[in-house]
Amino acid sequence: MISEKMIHMVNNSSAIRAMFEEGAKMAAQYGAENVYDYSLGNPNVAAPPQVKETIRELLEKEDPVRLHGYMNNAGFEEVRQTIAEFLNRKYNTSFSMKNILMTVGAAGGLNVILKTLLNPGDEVITFAPYFGEYRSYVSNFDGKLVEISPDTETFQPNLKELPKKITPKTKALIINTPNNPTGVVYSEETIQKLAEILNEKQKEFGTAIYLISDEPYRELVYDGAKVPYLTGYYDNTIVGYSFSKSLSLPGERIGYLVMPDSLTDGDLIISAAAVANRILGFVNAPGLMQLAVAECLDCKADVEYYNRNRKLLYDTLKRLGFSCIKPEGAFYLFVKSPVEDEKAFCEKAKEFHLLLVPGSSFGCSGFVRLAYCVKYETIVNSIPAFEQLAKVYFGGDQ
């Protein structure tokens, strides 16, 4: 018999993955061209050519024993130093290699830092809507995820509620900007106010509260949007980054944690995170990919491809009468369901071969998420299906 905790995990498995798997079955039944799968944030844009070229060069030139062997649990020293210097140039920081730990994607990084920080019963706060896997990541280490209710007008963090939810057991706050599922970028004003609240609560309770910034979508922004780099606003900030979206490498599982010297107990956290990386079973991040991304830090996926998708899908849904905020980053639209039960809306959408993810998966019922990291042709071809869906709820000629 599996563990009681895993029974709960299995019974509450990811709705996104379930929808993705259902989409594969529908594609087999109706033809892939007739199924419009907006469920999974799986980039459809190819990695920049430099990534392929760099991997080829590494395979030809590097010592294969070193290339494919173990290294320091924190990662290759030269890779970590290269990333630190890149961040220093870009964000006017002062990191060194000791502040960087290479991770198995952003998810691996989050699990490493939560393993490092949490005691059983410690509380981790996050703002709804949020990436649903945060529930599992916190539960992995017997922590308690505390949700802040959403501001469904702007989808900026609900800072009025935040101080009420911080307690002496609050160990961390996870934020995600650009945000999955809304595409909203948290403004500098929001970040400044957030930092003020956290500093006040640290003084009130005499505890350290760590701000964990989950940033896989940092490079995917539109219309000149700026994403504040949080270590400049709050001393106890830890940044988790992934190349899954910025370089279209989700299956390669490569990212890093930034743990600044300014952290309370910083040296201990840095040392413990490297141990957590090992004892969680990651051991180290993939060696070949560490060396590859270090040569491609100035590269990024074709953001204009996503921007074209964003414009077409947003404009189409607004024209048809749907309500949604225009995303500033990432590759998601968060659309208000025309009925209170968004799961029923998703079921109706499936009748037209449209696969959408219910907002309750992100702690925000009454909305649905669409991932527009699909082929442009998929969006074009799905428009008649959206028109039919709109007729069901809004009537008239769409």
Image (cartoon, grey):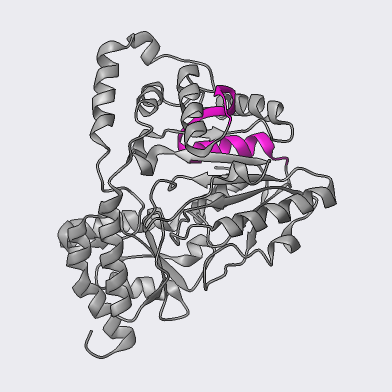
Q: Nearer the viewer, residue 224 or 142?
A: 224
Residue range corresponding to the magenta coloring: 94-119
Residue pictured at 50% horizontal, 22% vertical: 81
270 within the magenta span:
no
Vertical arrangement, residue 66 with respect to residue 230, above or below: above
Quarter holding the C terminus? bottom left
Residue 389 appears in which quarter of the rendering?
bottom left
- Asked whether the viewer can see residue 116, the reply is yes
Vertical arrangement, residue 331 with respect to residue 47, above or below: below
| Relative to 118, 318 lies left or right | left
112 within the magenta span:
yes
Residue pictured at 56% horizontal, 40% vertical: 239
| Relative to 195, 395 lies left or right | left
Predominant SS of the magenta segment: helix
Q: Position of residue 199 (x, y in %)?
A: 75, 50
| Relative to 2, 163 lies left or right | right
Residue 320 appears in which quarter of the rendering?
bottom left
- Asked whether the viewer can see residue 145, the reply is no
Q: Position of residue 97 (x, y in %)?
A: 55, 23
Residue 46 appears in which quarter of the rendering?
top left
Q: Position of residue 102 (x, y in %)?
A: 49, 28
| Relative to 284, 189 lies left or right | right
Quarter holding the N terminus? top right
Residue pictured at 37% horizontal, 29% vertical: 293
Q: Position of residue 62 (x, y in %)?
A: 32, 12
Q: Nearer the viewer, residue 135 or 46?
A: 46
Q: Nearer the viewer, residue 111 or 193?
A: 193
